[in-house]
Amino acid sequence: MFQPVVPTGGLAGWRFLQKTYDLQREAFNQSAQLNRETDYFRDNIGKVTSARELVDDRQLLSVALGAFGLQDDINNKFFIQKMLEEGTTADDALANRFTDKRYKDLSEAFGFGPNEFSPTAFSSFAERIVNLYETASFEVATGNVDETLRIALYAERKLPELAADDSSERSKWFSIMGESPLRAVFDTVFSLPKAFGQQDIDKQLEVFQERAERMFGSSDPAQFSDPEVLQDLMTKYVALSQISAFNANTSSGSIALMLLQS
């Protein structure tokens, strides 16, 4: 498998990755392992007509989940099957109960729910899922080199989609809070401690809106459909992550030096 090249961390690494993204993706997409996975999906997904058939084929399920960033759920077959079978049309469907929109996106894409149409037999569907899987897999591979840059790539891709959604400002923020990679970006940029996530959800929303308005000029996540605002956000996230890592290493190094000297 092609390993993404990131010669340095922080902003320099982020800018290098942005400049070389297309070339690196092209090389990554030619990896033998990736091609085996995507070829199998193309050849077999058209035979799948139910959620049960999908979860029973681990290779197909791996690509399906990976395309939506849910690869960690590969062993949760019962949960995934139930979520797919319930679909998304009913307000109380399992996928609709999560603030993390990735589950709804997965269920909606496969259309196995009541009164839904499943497009698995169409080649265009296979290509759509394969393209998502290749993109997500490159992000995962980047995370093996630098986790901050993996999150940055994901957020740069997903935030404009969320920003363009016709849901309310509150709903968009709740989606961001519920999707761990996106949450990580804003927790870092807004300098929020880990314990902040345990506070009342409406209080969290208030803080997110206030800090977004102060830092970016608007409390509405719709602003991140603007490439300049999005780039400002990503630059802040990568830079602050770099500073945080440097401070942690410096602190750890100072403590180690004191112990050696004592």
Image (cartoon, rainbow, N blue to C red):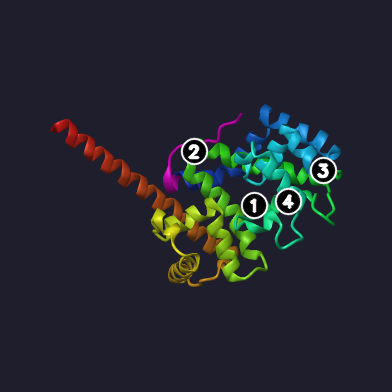
Mark 3 or mark 2: whose residue is earlier in sequence: 2
Label 1 sits on residue:
102
Does the stretch in magenta take in 2? yes
Does the stretch in magenta take in 117? no
Q: Is residue 26 above or below residue 193?
A: above
Q: State the image coordinates of residue 215 (x, y, percent, origin top left).
A: 44, 67
| Disc 1 to disc 3: CB gap under 8 Å | no
Label 4 sits on residue:
107
- The amino acid type of the residue labelled 3 equals Ser
Q: Residue farthest to the top?
A: 32
Marks 3 and 2, how far apart in space?
A: 41 Å
- Residue 50 numbered tag: 3
Q: Nearer the viewer, residue 168 or 107?
A: 107
Label 2 sits on residue:
6
Mark 1 or mark 2: whose residue is earlier in sequence: 2
Q: Does residue 247 appear left or right of residue 93 in this picture?
A: left
Mark 1 or mark 3: whose residue is earlier in sequence: 3
Marks 4 and 3, how far apart in space?
A: 12 Å
Mark 4 or mark 2: whose residue is earlier in sequence: 2
Q: Which residues are magenta?
A: 1-12
Secondary structure at badge 3 equals loop
